Image (spheres, rainbow, N blue to C red):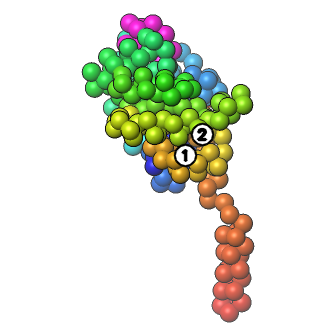
């Protein structure tokens, strides 16, 4: 299972990378705006800075919504670094663009996926990753985890190469459920990754070990 961090914050990316468990980064226009990154040159420089921290898989999202413009923008993003994965929204022109990028050897992440039907389209177009959004489905009273399960089953049925990248992950339980279902990748905030470290019995056990050592060694 791959861990991606879902942020544009360089310090958080570095912290997750230094932990030794990070396989990639996902960003979106909202996350870039949150970091105050604006203007095409600054946005590209920021993607490059992210690529300089991690080993691979940096999703950079297009803001174009029309086929020709998506292709132009995606090619420019792909030129920034070999680690870039072009993130394309699940819209008609997006699906066509994913097919084109795939034929050109440009990796893609199909984003804003909320149904199994959309995930089938993304896979048939040749997307490298499909991003179903768990948390946003939960927010409207649906079950985001059911969608992950459905997509994993369907992709396994037909041997699609597209990797299931569980997105909009809000807490460690989401991550663990994705792992049980067999999602290929989870992208989440730093606190979800570091949250995996925590267990009160680890803390109390360590405290006791250190206290016992001190008792006899001073
Ligand atoms: C990642 O690719 C998505 O853009 C992200 O996980 C969305 O998460 P959110 O629903 O917390 O904004």
Q: Is mark 1 within 8 Å of ligand 1?
A: no
Visible in this render: residue 154? yes
In the orientation shown, which residue stands out farthest toward the front?
157
Residue 148 image point, x, y percent: 54, 38
The image shows residue 217 at horizontal and vertical percentages of: 65, 90
In the image, residue 10 sits, relative to residue 95, either above or below, namely below
Tell me, for residue 45, which label it has, or none: none
Q: Which residues are magenta?
A: 58-71
Query: Please, what secondary structure does the residue beneath circle 1 have?
Result: helix
**Other-residue count near label 1 (Cα within 10 Å), few / some / many at <14 / 14–19 / ≥20:** many
**Residue closest to the far bottom:** 216
Q: Residue at x 62, y 59 (%)?
A: 197
Residue positioned 60% across, 28% down in the render: 31
Q: Are marks 2 and 1 in contact (CB under 8 Å)?
A: yes
Identify the residue position indicated by label 2 in the image.
145
- Gap in angstroms between the C-alphas marked 2 and 1: 7 Å
Where does the C terminus fall, quadrant-wise?
Answer: bottom right
Picture coordinates of residue 181 (x, y %)? 52, 47
Q: Is residue 24 within the magenta segment?
A: no
Residue found 41% across the figure and 36% down from its top: 155
* Nearer to me, 185 or 181: 181
* Location of residue 151 in the rendering, given as x and y in whole percent from the top left corner: 48, 35
Task: Decide if residue 76 is on the left or right side of residue 27.
Answer: left
* Residue hosting label 1: 178
In the foreground, 43 or 141 = 141
């Amino acid at each position: 299972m791959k861990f991606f961090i879902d942020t544009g914050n360089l310090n958080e990316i570095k912290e997750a990378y230094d932990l030794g468990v990070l396989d990639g980064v996902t960003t979106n226009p909202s996350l870039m705006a949150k970091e105050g990154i604006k203007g095409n040159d600054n946005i590209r420089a920021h993607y490059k800075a992210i690529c300089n921290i991690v080993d691979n898989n940096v999703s950079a999202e297009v803001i174009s919504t029309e086929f020709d413009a998506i292709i132009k923008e995606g090619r420019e993003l792909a030129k920034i670094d070999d680690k870039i994965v072009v993130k394309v929204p699940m819209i008609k022109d997006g699906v066509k663009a994913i097919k084109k990028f795939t034929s050109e050897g440009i990796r893609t992440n199909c984003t804003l996926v909320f149904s199994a039907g959309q995930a089938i389209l993304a896979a048939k177009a040749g997307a490298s990753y499909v991003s179903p959004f768990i948390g946003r489905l939960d927010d409207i009273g649906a079950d985001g985890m059911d969608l992950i399960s459905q997509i994993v089953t369907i992709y396994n049925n037909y041997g699609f190469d597209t990797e299931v990248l569980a997105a909009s992950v809000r807490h460690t339980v989401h991550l663990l459920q994705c792992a049980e279902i067999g999602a290929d990748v989870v992208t989440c905030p730093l606190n979800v990754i570091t949250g995996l470290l925590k267990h009160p019995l680890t803390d109390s056990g360590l405290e006791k070990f250190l206290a016992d050592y001190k008792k006899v060694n001073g």
